[in-house]
C-alpha cells in the first residue's frame, strides 16, 4: 500500500488545552468539565478518489517506484517542505498503516520460517550425502587413487586372463611408465630423484652426514661441469694416489702389505664382502667371518690398456698386460675345484707369509687398536675359511714370490679401474652420493619423505604373516610331525627389522657415529678413494661390535631381505612407501602387494638353501629323511616347469636350477598370502575407485601382479642366465597358474595356460 503524503491537512479545530490552576488557587474537584466535541468523520465516497488508489483509471496495479531513478536535487536555498503523514489529534489511525505494519510482521515471521526450513533442508541433505559416502565405502586417499590408476591404466582387457594373466594385468604398462624395469625399479628411480632434489636445494644444515653428502655432490658437479682442466687435475691426483698408497709400476720388490688395504673394495648383494684382490672377508650377521677367494675379474687387454693410458699417462707394453692376465689366471686356477672342508687361520698365515694377513686387515679399521682384538678372535675361531688356502698355501706363496712384479701391476690396475669407473662422466652425481654414502642418504629419505605410520602396519603384517605360515605348516598333509615342529620353531624365532634401526629415529644419533670428513681442498678423485675406504670401515666397525648399526641391512634401495645365517627378515623403508604401499590401503591391497613380498622373504627360510639352517641360522638338517625326498621332488616340479616355460623374450632357454630358490619363495608366498587374504572380512573393507562393484578376489590377483609389471627386458639371454630370479612374466603367470584359487576365481577352463592339469605345490 502506498501512502499519499501530499494530502491536505485537516481543517478541524483542535481543542485548546485546559488552563492549569494558578498557584495558590484550589480546584473544585466536583465541578464538571465541559466535554470536547468530536467532529464526525464522513465515510469516504467510493465513487471519489481514495487515498493510495492509482489516479490512472487504466492502470490496474499500483506503480512500482523506480529505485534507480535519481532523486530530484534541490536548488540552492530552496526550502525543504516536511509533511506530517500522521492523523491529526482526535482523528482515527489510517487503516493502510495498520495493514502495512501487519504485513511487515507477517513477512518477518514467514522469512524466519523459510530460513529455518532451508537450514533443516541443508542439514538433512548433508546427512544424506555423508550417509551416502559411508555407504559407498570407497578409499579416496591420493595413495588409493594412485593404486587405482595403476590397475586401470596398466591392464589390457583385450587379453584373456586365463591365457596370459601377466599381459592382462600389465599389457599397457609401457604406455604409462618410462622406467625400464618393474615397479620396484620404478620406486628406486623415484628414490634417487628425491635425493637429487634434496642435494640441488643445497640447504644449510648442522648435520655432519648431510654436509658430507652436499660436499661430495658439489665436488662431483665441479668435476663434471666446469672445464676439462678439472678432469685432468683429478687424473693427475689419481696417479699420485697410486704412488703413495699402492706402489710403482713394474716394481720387482712390490710391497703387498702396503697395497692390499688401499685397493680394497666392498661388494655383494648387501655389501657384506670386503675384496682385497687376492682374498675376501665376508660376513652375514657379523658374528662369524668367512675367508674365500676373490671374486674380482679382469677386463680384456684393450680395456686395460685404455684405463692405464688415461690415468697414468703412459702406454703399458703387451708383455706387462699379458703378465697381469697370466698371474690372475694362475691364482684363480687354484680355487676352481670345490674342495670340501675348512682351514685354520693360523695355519694359513704360516703357509703364505708373503701376505701379512693381520696387518693388512688391521689397516682397514678406523681404530685398529680397539677393533682388531675383536675381529681377530672371530677370524681365528672361524669355521668358514676355505680349505684351498691351506691345501695350496705353499703354491700360492711360490706364485707371489715368482711373479711379484706382475702381482704388483695387477693390484695397481685393480685400484685404477675402480676409481676410473667412479670418475666416468656418465655417472650422475646424486647416484655417486647414494652409492658411496648409502646410510646418510637413507637417513635423508627417512627424515624427509617416509610416512612412519606405514611401519606400524607392516610390522603387524609381518607377525600376522608368520602366524598364517605356521597354520599352513600345521595343515600340511605330507609333512611329518617332527618336521612340522621344527619348521614352526624356526618361523616363530624369525627376527624382523621393518623400516630402519633406532639410530635413525633419535635426532643426531647417526651423526654421532658418522666420521667421514671432506676437506674443501680435496680433489674429487681423492674423495672417492677415501669414501671407498670409509665404506669398508663402517662394515668392520659393525663386525667388531663397535656399533649396532648394520650397514648390510640398510641398503639405499627398494627391497626386502632374508638372511639364512641369522634367520632374520629386513623390510627396507622404500619398499613400504607410496606408491607400493600406504597405511590407507584396504587390507586386501596391502596383503596382495607388499604382503606377498613379506611372505616371499619368509619363504626363503624354507627354500633349497634356507631349509638347511635352523631357527638360529646354524647349518643343520632338521627335516626327516622322508620329508627331504618329498620336498626335493616338489622343487624339481618347479625346475622342470620353468625350463619348459615359453617366455616371450627368451623362449624355452631358462635355467630352473639357478632360479629355484626364488621360485620356491614365490610359490610359498602365493599360498601364504591367499590364506592371509581369506581371513579378512571383505564386507568391512573399502573399495578402490573404479572397482566399486568389482570382484575383490579378482582384484587381489591383479594387485599382486603389479609388483612385477614391466616392459620387455632389454638385456640379453646370457645376462638373464646369471640372474637367480625368474623372469617377471613367470613370476605372475607361473606362480598363479600353480595356485588353484586363481583358476577358481577367474573360472579358467581345465588345461588352459593359467589352469594346467599339473600344478607345482609345496605345503
Image (cartoon, rainbow, N blue to C red):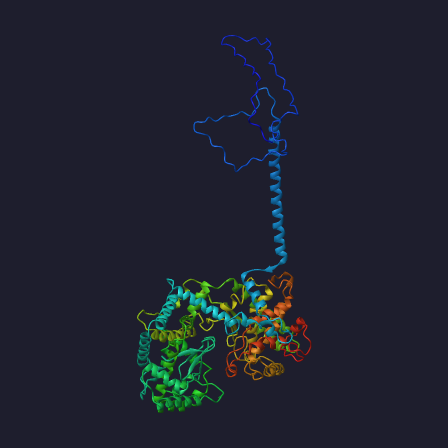
The relative height of residue 142 versus residue 382 in the rendered view (above or below) is above
x and y percent of residue 524 in the render? 34, 73
x and y percent of residue 49 in the render? 62, 26
In the image, 66: left or right of 40? left
Name the foreground residue: 153 vs 119: 153
Q: Is residue 741 visible?
A: yes
Q: Is residue 605 visible?
A: no
Q: Residue at 30% of width from left, 70% of height from top? A: 521
Name the foreground residue: 526 vs 291: 526
x and y percent of residue 161 in the render? 63, 73
In the picture, residue 674 is in which quadrant? bottom right
In the picture, residue 733 is in which quadrant? bottom right
In the image, 325: left or right of 462? left
Quarter in which the N terminus is drawn: top right
Q: How many marks?
A: 0
The relative height of residue 326 versus residue 194 in the rendered view (above or below) is below
x and y percent of residue 446 in the render? 46, 65
Quarter in which the C terminus is drawn: bottom right
In the image, 52: left or right of 521? right
Name the foreground residue: 629 vs 341: 629
Amino acid at each position: 500500500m502506498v501512502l499519499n503524503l501530499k494530502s491536505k491537512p485537516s481543517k478541524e479545530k483542535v481543542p485548546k488545552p485546559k488552563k492549569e490552576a494558578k498557584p495558590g488557587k484550589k480546584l473544585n474537584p466536583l465541578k464538571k468539565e465541559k466535554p470536547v466535541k468530536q467532529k464526525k468523520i464522513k465515510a469516504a465516497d467510493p465513487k471519489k478518489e481514495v487515498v493510495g488508489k492509482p489516479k490512472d483509471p487504466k492502470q490496474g496495479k499500483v506503480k512500482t517506484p523506480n529505485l534507480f531513478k535519481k532523486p530530484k536535487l534541490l536548488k540552492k536555498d530552496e526550502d525543504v517542505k516536511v509533511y506530517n503523514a500522521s492523523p491529526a489529534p482526535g482523528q482515527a489511525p489510517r487503516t493502510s498503516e495498520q495493514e502495512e505494519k501487519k504485513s511487515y510482521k507477517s513477512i518477518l515471521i514467514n522469512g524466519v520460517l523459510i530460513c529455518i526450513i532451508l537450514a533443516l533442508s541443508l542439514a538433512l541433505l548433508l546427512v544424506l550425502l555423508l550417509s551416502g559416502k559411508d555407504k559407498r565405502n570407497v578409499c579416496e586417499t591420493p595413495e588409493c587413487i594412485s593404486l587405482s590408476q595403476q590397475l586401470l591404466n596398466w591392464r589390457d582387457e583385450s587379453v584373456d586372463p586365463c591365457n596370459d594373466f601377466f599381459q592382462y594385468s600389465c599389457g599397457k604398462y609401457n604406455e604409462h611408465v618410462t622406467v625400464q624395469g618393474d615397479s620396484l625399479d620404478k620406486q628406486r628411480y623415484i628414490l634417487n630423484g628425491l635425493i637429487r632434489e634434496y642435494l640441488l636445494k643445497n640447504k644449510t644444515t648442522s648435520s655432519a652426514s648431510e654436509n658430507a653428502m652436499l660436499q661430495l655432490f658439489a665436488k662431483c658437479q665441479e668435476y663434471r661441469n666446469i672445464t676439462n682442466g678439472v678432469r685432468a687435475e683429478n687424473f693427475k691426483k689419481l696417479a699420485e694416489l697410486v704412488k703413495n698408497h699402492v706402489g710403482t709400476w713394474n716394481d720387482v720388490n712390490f710391497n703387498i702389505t702396503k697395497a692390499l688395504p688401499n685397493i680394497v673394495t666392498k661388494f655383494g648383494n648387501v655389501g657384506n664382502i670386503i675384496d682385497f684382490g687376492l682374498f675376501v672377508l665376508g660376513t652375514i650377521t657379523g658374528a662369524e667371518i668367512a675367508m674365500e677367494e676373490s671374486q674380482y675379474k679382469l677386463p680384456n687387454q684393450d680395456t686395460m690398456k685404455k684405463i692405464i693410458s688415461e690415468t697414468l699417462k703412459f702406454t703399458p707394453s703387451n708383455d706387462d698386460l699379458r703378465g697381469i692376465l697370466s698371474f690372475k689366471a694362475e691364482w684363480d686356477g687354484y680355487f676352481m675345484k670345490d674342495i670340501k672342508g675348512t682351514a685354520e687361520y693360523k695355519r694359513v698365515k704360516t703357509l703364505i707369509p708373503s701376505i701379512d694377513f693381520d696387518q693388512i686387515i688391521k689397516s682397514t679399521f678406523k681404530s685398529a687398536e680397539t677393533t682388531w682384538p675383536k675381529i681377530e678372535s672371530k677370524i681365528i675361531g672361524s669355521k668358514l675359511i676355505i680349505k684351498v688356502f691351506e691345501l695350496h698355501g705353499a703354491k700360492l706363496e711360490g706364485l707371489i714370490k715368482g711373479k711379484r712384479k706382475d702381482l704388483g701391476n695387477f693390484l695397481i690396475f685393480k685400484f685404477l679401474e675402480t676409481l676410473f669407473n667412479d670418475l666416468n662422466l656418465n655417472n650422475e652425481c646424486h647416484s655417486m652420493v647414494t652409492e658411496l654414502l648409502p646410510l646418510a642418504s637413507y637417513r635423508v629419505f627417512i627424515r624427509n619423505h617416509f610416512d612412519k605410520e606405514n611401519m606400524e602396519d607392516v610390522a603387524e603384517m609381518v607377525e600376522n604373516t608368520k602366524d598364517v605360515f605356521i597354520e599352513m605348516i600345521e595343515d600340511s598333509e605330507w609333512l611329518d610331525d617332527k618336521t612340522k615342529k621344527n619348521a614352526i620353531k624356526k618361523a616363530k624365532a624369525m627376527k624382523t627389522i621393518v623400516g630402519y634401526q633406532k639410530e635413525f629415529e633419535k635426532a643426531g644419533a647417526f651423526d654421532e657415529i658418522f666420521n667421514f670428513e671432506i676437506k674443501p681442498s680435496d680433489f674429487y678423485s681423492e674423495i672417492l678413494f677415501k669414501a671407498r675406504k670409509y665404506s669398508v670401515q663402517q662394515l668392520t666397525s659393525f663386525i667388531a661390535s663397535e656399533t649396532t648399526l648394520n650397514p648390510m641391512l640398510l641398503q639405499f634401495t627398494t627391497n626386502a631381505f632374508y638372511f639364512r645365517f641369522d634367520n632374520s627378515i629386513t623390510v627396507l623403508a622404500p619398499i613400504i612407501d607410496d606408491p607400493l604401499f600406504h597405511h590407507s590401503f584396504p587390507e586386501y591391497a596391502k596383503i596382495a602387494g607388499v604382503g606377498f613380498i613379506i611372505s616371499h622373504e619368509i619363504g626363503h627360510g624354507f627354500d633349497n638353501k634356507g631349509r638347511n639352517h635352523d631357527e638360529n641360522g646354524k647349518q643343520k638338517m632338521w627335516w626327516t629323511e622322508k620329508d627331504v625326498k618329498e620336498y626335493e621332488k616338489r622343487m624339481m616340479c618347479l625346475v622342470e616347469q620353468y625350463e619348459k616355460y615359453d617366455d616371450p623374450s627368451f623362449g624355452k632357454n631358462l635355467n630352473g636350477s639357478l632360479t629355484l630358490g626364488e621360485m620356491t619363495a614365490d610359490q610359498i608366498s602365493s599360498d601364504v598370502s591367499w590364506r592371509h587374504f581369506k581371513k579378512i572380512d571383505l564386507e568391512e573393507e573399502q573399495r578402490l575407485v573404479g572397482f566399486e562393484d568389482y570382484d575383490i578376489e579378482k582384484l587381489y590377483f591383479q594387485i599382486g601382479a603389479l609388483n612385477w609389471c614391466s616392459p620387455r627386458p632389454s638385456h640379453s639371454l646370457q645376462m638373464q642366465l646369471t640372474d637367480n630370479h625368474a623372469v617377471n612374466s613367470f613370476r605372475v603367470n607361473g606362480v598363479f597358474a600353480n595356485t588353484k584359487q586363481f583358476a577358481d576365481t577367474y573360472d579358467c577352463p581345465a588345461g588352459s595356460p593359467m589352469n594346467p592339469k599339473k600344478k607345482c605345490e609345496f605345503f
